[in-house]
Amino acid sequence: MINTIRRFRWAINLLAAVAAVAAVVGLLTVGLREDYRLEAFVASSDPAYEEFRAFMDEFTSNEFALLAIHGRIAFDADMERALTDAVNRLRTVPGVARAGSLVDIPAYVRSAMGERLLAHPLLAGNLISEDRRTVAVLCSMAGEDVGGSARRANVVALRGIADALRAEYPQYEFILTGPYVTLIDMYAYVDHDLMVFSMLAFVLVVVTMGAVFRRVKPMLYAGAVAACAILCTLGLTVALGIVCSLITQMLVILIIVLAVANCVHLAVASEEAIAELPNGSPDERYGMTLRHMLAPCCAVMVTTAVGFGSVSISQIAPVRRFGGLMVFGLVIALVLGFTGVYRLHRGSLPPARLARMGDALGAVARTALKHRIACGVFFVGLVVISILGVPRLRFESDFVKNFRPESSVRKSYRFIEEHLSPLGSVEVVVRRRDGGAIATAENVERVAALGKSFVAKHEPVRRALTLADLLTLGFGAEPVNDVDVQSRLGLLQLWPSGAALRRNFLNEAGDALRINLRCIEGFDVDGKLRVCAAIQREAADAFGPEYQTEVTGLYYFYAKLVSGLLRDQYRALGLTVAAITAVMGLMLRSVRWTLIAMAVNLLPVVACLGAMGWARVPVNMTTAMMLSATMGIAVDDTLHYIWRYRRERAGCAGVSETLVRTHESVGRACVFTTVVIAGGFSILMLSEFLPTAYFGGLVGFTMFVALAADLVLLPVLVSAFARRG
């Protein structure tokens, strides 16, 4: 293997350079494939998603945008002109299937019914606020079949209309929001982070590499390896047409940081080779570095790949792609790290440069060994405190809370919840099993009673809209018999938007009804799912066995999505622990060493969970995925440490002396890699997208805990096991 690397290193480097250039051409000409649909976010075979899609096909699409107009005085002729202008402009956007508002109701009807109409459940809180100072245009958007670029273009057009209206009607506020807009906002934040933070992270880690080594060559070496690895990975996504819209930014930063971390270990080894062979040729020094580093670096790659690969068991499509692409990028970084490190073996180094940090780290080892009991008590206390923090973990399923409190997304949602209705929706679909007509007076009365019951019994539910509300719009009392129901439905067809209004609550076949529940956020995943399960049971009990009831909607679907992801990621963490244990057992060929390594590396994961609990950092899609990935990263330094200790121990030095020498050598690389990784990820804490910010901060924290465990706890455990034979 070593001879193969030495023989073909130029060819490998040339091939990597060609692949990187080809990737750049592909990125500039074809670009990354973007898809902003929910379908790109989940597994299309997910039963919850299939139910949600079926609901949107059968009834009015649940994808909507909302433009609210807010003034200082109650709705008047001037606000009506602004509202009419907004409706007419919004209807020109290709993705807007229907734009509904108060002006859809003829003026003479509004004049005749007056306040009674404005207080109707279909209007009050939906299209006009109780204080009459806020009106809204509800835009039903084209469904999931619309591609990513078209969806982004639709939101750009909606924003352009809102901006134009603000300029023309300065006396009013115009607030554009809704799930359709917010999903695109999320992608926009991720794309911004990709452009800004990925570049900053690259510059930061490369400059850090130069600062710790105080030479230009290691910096250029690490930068070239990281750039080639990430370009080849992105080029693969372009060549295969892989959609990676949500994971690109995290993928880029992780590959950059981990590629540079691997280069740190190889650069430190090259310095040691120069020190050991001061009169040797570059080829001799390079051969020594490969002999010493090939096995541990390959072992590190395998364990890190296991950590990232384990997340691929998730049902979430971007997460599965993330795991596979990370493994590919890490393999490229490993190979280029070996072939590119050759150029660092030329010249010489001042002896003092290698001694200063080595002396300090040797002192750390001596102190830890001298105060074994105190060190053990400290880490046991850290574990206990962390475990006590785990029950405080909260699982976040509020999609809007992915954005910072001061962001326009959060402010818009708060405004709508305060002045109109919550935007979270739970949909209850009731269907006749025999396919007969469901729109009967008895069923209209049932859904009306159920809606009131849901609002009264379940705290998240603030409004319920049913077919009964539609049939009383303009008619007054509820229908008295089945003939009355059918006649009212027939009259609705004569309204310009009557057919669309009917499809909100009754499917075209006439055998299924919809109950629309508006729900507030602020409840955890389990709480949301419990409420939805209770709603389904109550609906089934109310209608009996002749009817089939199901619950769907964005509120329920997103809670199921997060719940499934959390379950998958805990399984992935268990798989990661088992797989890394097996891999380390095979590579170290010792149960004792495997147990020591796993004890040291489980500590940072437990500390991370405890810190999240005590700091009230929510567990969401990104932070859940982080646990397996972090363990895959943290184990790297431990493997390098153990490998070096066993090599030094073969020289028959005493245990304490061997540990000090290991600290003085590989300890430097451990410190450098931690600084590089933590520094690269810390820049993410500035992100406006909170999952990204949490990910960056938690990885940095976990890596420093892992460094403390490697430099303090690991020598204590090694010493204790050595004394016991």
Image (cartoon, grey):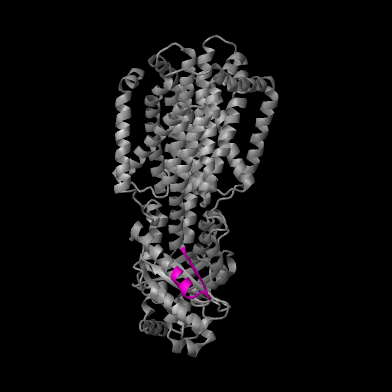
Q: Position of residue 699 (x, y in %)?
A: 54, 39
Task: Report how many numbered discs are placed on residues in the image.
Answer: 0
Check the image and report above or below for 721 versus 201. above
Specify whether 71 is left or right of 309: right
Tell me the residue at 33%/28% (across/down).
Answer: 13
- Occupied quadrant, residue 502: bottom left
Q: Where is the C terminus found, in terms of image quarters?
A: top right
Q: Nearer the viewer, residue 116 or 481?
A: 116
Instruction: Judge by depth and name the residue closer to the eye, 720 or 201.
Output: 201
Which x, y percent locates residue 620?
A: 52, 49
Q: State the image coordinates of residue 30 (x, y, percent, origin top left).
A: 29, 48
Q: Is residue 420 above or below residue 115?
A: above
Quarter-of-image position of residue 149: bottom left
Q: Does residue 133 show up?
A: yes
In this picture, is 67 found above or below 441? above
Image quadrant occupied by the N terminus = top left
Residue 90 within the magenta-colored segment of the rendering: no
The image shows residue 454 at horizontal and vertical percentages of 55, 68
- Residue 547 visible somewhere in the drawing: no
Residue segment shown in magenta:
163-178
Instruction: Judge left or right: residue 367 versus residue 680.
Output: right
The answer to whether residue 164 is magenta is: yes
